[in-house]
Image: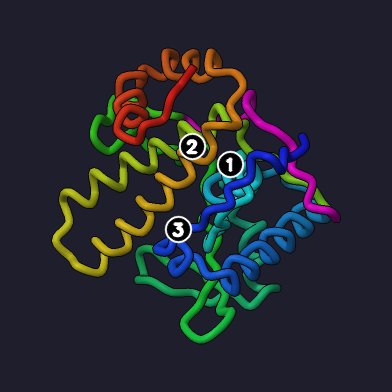
Amino acid sequence: MTRDSSKRIDSPLDELGSEYPSELTTRSFEELKSLAFYGKSMGPEFFVIGGWAAWRYHSGFGSRDIDVVFHDHQIMDPFLAKYYKMNDYEPYGGPFETRYRKRIGDGMFVQIDAASFADGQPFKEDRRRNLPFGLLMNHNDIWNLGESVVRIPKPELLILQKVKAHRDRSWELSRTTAPIQSDWLRGKIRKDEYDIRSIAPFITDWNSVRVILEDCDCRDLVEDSFKALRVKSR
C-alpha cells in the first residue's frame, strides 16, 4: 500500500495542534515501531487501529496513544506484560483496573490501549448493535514500519470504527458531569471528527462500507454521523 502525497492533510487545526504536540506524537510513533519490532521477534500478530492507523492514510495529526487488537488474551496478556517490564512502563489506576503507561517527559505519557477480538463492545446508545473486531481479519492492509510490519484496517472499516468511537464518546459526554472527564471526551471527539473527515477521501470502495453496515445492522447510525459531519459517501 502506498501513500498518495497529493491527499495529505496540510491545514493543521489549532485545537488539535495543542492537544497533539509533535514532541508527544513523535515519541508515541517511536514507541509504536518499538512495539511492532518486539512483536516481530516474539511472534504474535496484532492490528493497529485508532489514531495511528488513521495517520497512515491521511498523514495529518498523529496519535498520543497506541491502539492495538490481538486475537485473544492468551496471546496478548503475556506479550504485553513482558513488553511493559522491558520498556519502563509504570502501573497506574485502581486495584480493579491497573493500566500501564510510559513516561516520556514532564507530565507526558504514552499508553498502549490493547484489546482482543472478544473485547469489542456494542454501541453505547444501542447495545444490540456492534462493529466486532473480528472484521479486521477480512478488511486489513499491511503497514511497513521499516524494521517490521503491522496490519491496519482498510479505510472502509477504519472510518466505521472511528464513527463508532465518535458516537460512543458523544453518548458518554451527554451523561457526564465531571469537568475533567468532559474536557477529555471533547478532545477525543474533536480528533475523531478530524480523522473521519480525513479518512473519507481514501475510500475507494463505498459499496464495501455499505456491506459491512448492513451485516452489522448499523447503517442508520453511521449515516446519521456522516450527515452530521458532512461526509459524502459515494
**Which residue is the site of mark 2?**
118
Q: Is residue 61 above or below residue 1?
A: below
Q: Are marks 1 and 2 in contact (CB under 8 Å)?
A: yes
Residue wearing tag 1: 72
Relative to residue 19, is residue 147 depicted above or below?
above
102 to 229, vertically: above or below = below
Q: Label 3: which residue?
A: 13
Q: Nearer the viewer, residue 208 or 16?
A: 16
Count of numbered labels shown in the rendering: 3
For discs 3 and 1, the disc positioned in front in the rendered view:
3
Q: Earlier in the sequence, mark 3 or mark 2?
A: 3
Q: CA distance from mark 1 to mark 2?
A: 7 Å
Q: Label 3 crowding class (10 Å Cα cut-off): few <14, some 14-19, many 20+?
A: few
Dot 3 or dot 1, earlier in sequence: 3
Residue type, label 3: Leu
SS under mark 3 = loop
Q: Amino acid at mark 1?
A: Asp
Residue at 43% x, 63% y is 14
